[in-house]
Amino acid sequence: IMNEAGETTLPYTLTTGDGSLGQFPAASNDGNDHNDYDHDIIPLECAAPEAPRCGWLHTICSSIVTNEHFEVFVFALIIVNGVLMGLDTLDVVRQNDVLYQAFESAEFLFLVMFTIELLLDFGYR
């Protein structure tokens, strides 16, 4: 990595005596297996900066999404939806207009519930 002065630097920070952080130039290739600095070397975090969060929305979504009962509810939705999708392929369901309409309505309801769960997860993260 090149800094503004054109020096090659490593992706590390160092703590100075006053506790401040800063990058340092790459060690020279003089054959030594040690660095030429008597500072603590700390690897830089490679994470992207966090996006600003709307505090109240994040708090509400976090309390819902991390709730154990909500997680069990979503898991149950997935299982029931899978079973209904399997039953929807049967000829008995396909040939009965009332039953077929009930399955279509249930499918739409699952779509709405999974969309709400997705939006809550987006609000949480």
Image (cartoon, rainbow, N blue to C red):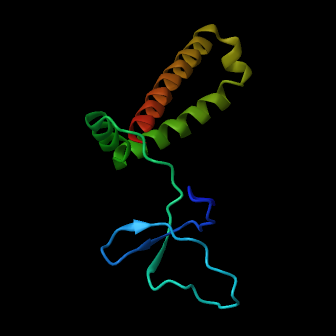
Residue shown at 44% from the left, 30% from the top = 119
Q: Residue at x 49, y 27 (%)?
A: 115
- Image location of residue 68, percent across then percent down: 36, 49
Which part of the image, by quadrant, shows the N terminus? bottom right
Residue 83: % across, % down: 60, 35
Q: Against 120, is 88 above or below?
A: above
Spot the residue most to the front.
5
Q: Name the residue: 28% across, 40% down.
A: 59
Q: Which image quarter holds the C terminus?
A: top left
User: Going by the picture, which residue comes out furthest to the bottom?
Assistant: 32
Residue 24 placed where, x, y %? Answer: 52, 70
Q: Is residue 31 left or right of residue 15?
A: right
**Residue at the far right in the pictured view:** 91
Q: Is residue 3 left or right of residue 109?
A: right
Of residues 59 and 110, which is closer to you in this image? Answer: 59
Residue at the far left: name it.
Answer: 56
Where does residue 64 sit, x and y in percent of width and height? 33, 40
Asked whether 108 or 42 is in front, the reply is: 42
Residue 65: image quadrant is top left
How many marks overall? 0
Image quadrant in which you'd find residue 52: top left
Q: Residue at x 44, y 81 (%)?
A: 39
**Quadrant hosting residue 88:** top right
Q: Is residue 81 left or right of residue 20?
A: right
